[in-house]
């Protein structure tokens, strides 16, 4: 009779258990363990996302005032992270996200002059072995990330990207080039704040074109992406067109996000 009440209480109690470990983010599959895990995320950030990106309030995100605020805030944050004083933030950040610094070079936090230096830290050789790296027929995951793949762009729009004007043409602002990929497959590599923030080419090939597109700095959390705000076609982004023997032309697009201030 009161099954629905028990279900609600179970949900509340379950999430209360996750809060001390900040496990309140989006669920993703850990391929090493085969278990679904929630990303670590500050609770206040989670609440902010829920408040801003929901059907009742998401219209606020598209106003000029909000876009300008987010843009200026992200640029300011990016500049502050390049200042020596930002070094003091590194230790708390590593502890919050349980980052294993043994994977990185240098591993000593004192070697990083600024938070920006730490943010773009390098992997130690061998910590991320490439699967069959001598076989160009194998495309690889290009960064530490959460991967989502779709056979077609319409499938990505149906299941993942809810913005009203998403298309490859709008993403890269090129009608002719976009038309080549509008029926293509999509692989999304989404980085979280704690991740290694360097991209590597997913394929072997030759760069044919590079373009940088200015824009906003909305959050790219799944909550935001599943709103009707056109995040991916509004945020600052760079793209590279790669010519390959095995896959034909591959379009690689890197998209900026809140609080970074660069792509």
Image: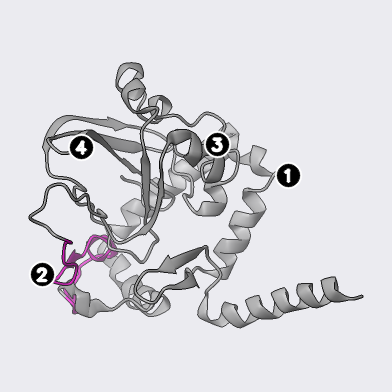
The stretch of residues the image draws in magenta is 107-131
- Return the mark for residue 125: 2
Q: Nearer the viewer, residue 9 or 112?
A: 9
Circle 3 residue: 163
Mark 4 highlights which residue?
247
For the residues labelled 2 and 3, the Cα–Cα distance comes to 39 Å
The residue carrying pointer 1 sits among few (fewer than 14), some (14 to 19) or many (20 or more) residues within 10 Å by Cα, namely: few
First-in-chain label (4 vs 2): 2
Assess whether residue 198 is covered by the magenta stretch.
no
Q: Position of residue 24 (x, y in %)?
A: 56, 70
Residue topped by disc 1: 56
- Mark 4 secondary-structure assignment: loop
Quadrant (top left/top right/bottom left/bottom right) for the N terminus: bottom right
The mark that comes first in sequence, 1 or 4, is 1
Determine the secondary structure under disc 1: loop
Which of the 4 image quadrants contains residue 244?
top left
Residue mark closest to the camera, 3 vs 1: 3
> Who comes first in sequence, dot 4 or dot 3?
3
Residue pictured at 58% horizontal, 66% vertical: 44
Q: Answer with the quarter of the image where residue 105 lies.
A: bottom left
Tell me if residue 23 can be seen: yes
Q: How is the image coloured?
A: one colour
């Amino acid at each position: 009779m009161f099954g629905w009440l028990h279900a609600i209480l179970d949900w509340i109690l379950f999430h209360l258990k996750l809060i001390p470990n900040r496990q309140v983010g989006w669920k993703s599959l850990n391929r090493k363990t085969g278990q679904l895990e929630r990303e670590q995320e500050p609770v206040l950030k989670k609440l902010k996302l829920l408040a801003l990106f929901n059907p009742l309030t998401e219209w606020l995100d598209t106003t000029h005032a909000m876009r300008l605020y987010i843009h200026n805030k992200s640029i300011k944050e990016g500049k502050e992270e390049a200042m020596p004083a930002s070094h003091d933030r590194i230790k708390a950040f590593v502890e919050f996200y349980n980052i294993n610094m043994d994977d990185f070079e240098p591993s000593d936090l004192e070697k990083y002059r600024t938070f920006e230096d730490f943010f773009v830290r390098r992997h130690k050789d061998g910590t991320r072995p490439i699967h069959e790296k001598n076989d160009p027929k194998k495309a690889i995951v290009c960064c530490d990330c959460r991967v989502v793949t779709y056979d077609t762009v319409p499938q990505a729009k149906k299941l993942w990207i809810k913005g009203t004007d998403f298309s490859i043409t709008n993403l890269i602002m090129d009608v002719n080039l976009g038309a080549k990929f509008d029926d293509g497959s999509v692989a999304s590599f989404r980085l979280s704040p704690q991740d290694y923030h360097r991209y590597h080419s997913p394929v072997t090939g030759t760069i044919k074109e590079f373009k940088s597109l200015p824009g906003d700095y909305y959050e790219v959390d799944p909550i935001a992406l599943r709103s009707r705000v056109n995040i991916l076609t509004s945020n600052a982004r760079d793209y590279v067109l790669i010519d390959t023997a095995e896959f034909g032309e591959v379009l690689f697009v890197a998209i900026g996000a809140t609080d970074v201030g660069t792509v």
